Amino acid sequence: MTFIHFTQEATREAREAAEYFGLRPSANEPPSGVYLLADAEGISLCRAGEKGRVRVDFGGGAAQYRRLKGGGELIAKAVNHTSQPTVWDGTGGLGRDSFVLASLGLSVRTFEQNPAVACLLADGLKRALQQPEVAEIAGRIALQFGDAGKLLPMAAEQFGRPDVVYLDPMYPERQKSAAVKKEMAYFHDLVGAAQDEAALLSAARMVAKKRVVVKRPRLGEYLNGEKPAYQYTGKSTRFDVYLPDNPAKD
């Protein structure tokens, strides 16, 4: 279980979120490992003894750059965004791809199974809803806590099947940026073991009406060793597209 340390400035909402996601309160900074910190600015991921912090910030940083300067063209093609599909992101993480998809005007349901990551993402979405420049985009993202490999079929019964299921499973980072390295190191320490790839891909292909899109490093292996129907390949990333088991009839 991940610890969360509350400062005196921590908000009531942060405490409620920690309780909802089952995080263990800590009166002091833990002696080792990664933990969450709740203060006046929101909830951050930290590592004991280090100053660095990772926080979900849809109004600034990389999210702001991609929103204002462009980007996401390849993922847009991969999900066929011009058809305005409904997209379910089965591996929410810190929400970056969900935010890009929502920035394209798409409705996104985001699944995250790790309680600490889900807490970070929920906090980021809450703050984004209070920022006029990104509130509309954040409002198109619905966060669902739990393992997508198990929840996708149940969610499909409740909400109807999505057009596209998007997956970006954990994969070793090869980025050279020191900032990215630190952020991903914290994230890997927090998340630990990857999801069950076979169950995840199988559930995605079962509920998607049109396609399953899997993000991989350009030279990375296929998810669960299964060859896709086709691909969209960029300089460092590619998107593998799988056909659904029960495609929708137009």
Image: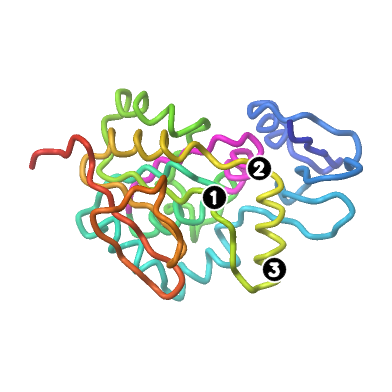
Report which residue position mark 1 lands on.
170
Q: Nearer the viewer, residue 61 or 59?
A: 61
Which of disc 3 and disc 1 is earlier in sequence? 1
User: Would residue 85 be seen by someone viewing this image from the given angle?
Assistant: yes
Q: What residue is rendered at 43% in x and 67% in y?
A: 218
Is residue 107 in the magenta section? yes
Q: Residue 176 falls in which quadrant of the image? A: bottom right
According to the picture, the residue beneath numbered tag 2 turns out to be 192
Question: Could you classify mark 3 by the number of other residues whose Cα lies within 10 Å: few (under 14), some (14-19), or many (20 or more)?
Answer: few
The stretch of residues the image draws in magenta is 106-124
Instruction: Assess whether residue 35 is covered by the magenta stretch.
Output: no
Give the SS element for disc 1.
loop
Which x, y percent locates residue 78?
30, 59
Q: Residue 207 vs residue 4: left or right?
A: left
Do labels 3 and 2 touch, CB within 8 Å? no
Residue visible at 55% across and 47% down in the picture: 93
Q: Earlier in the sequence, mark 3 or mark 2?
A: 3
Q: Amino acid at mark 3?
A: Ala
Q: Looking at the image, is 241 positioned above or below residue 197?
A: below
Q: Position of residue 224 (x, y in %)?
A: 41, 45
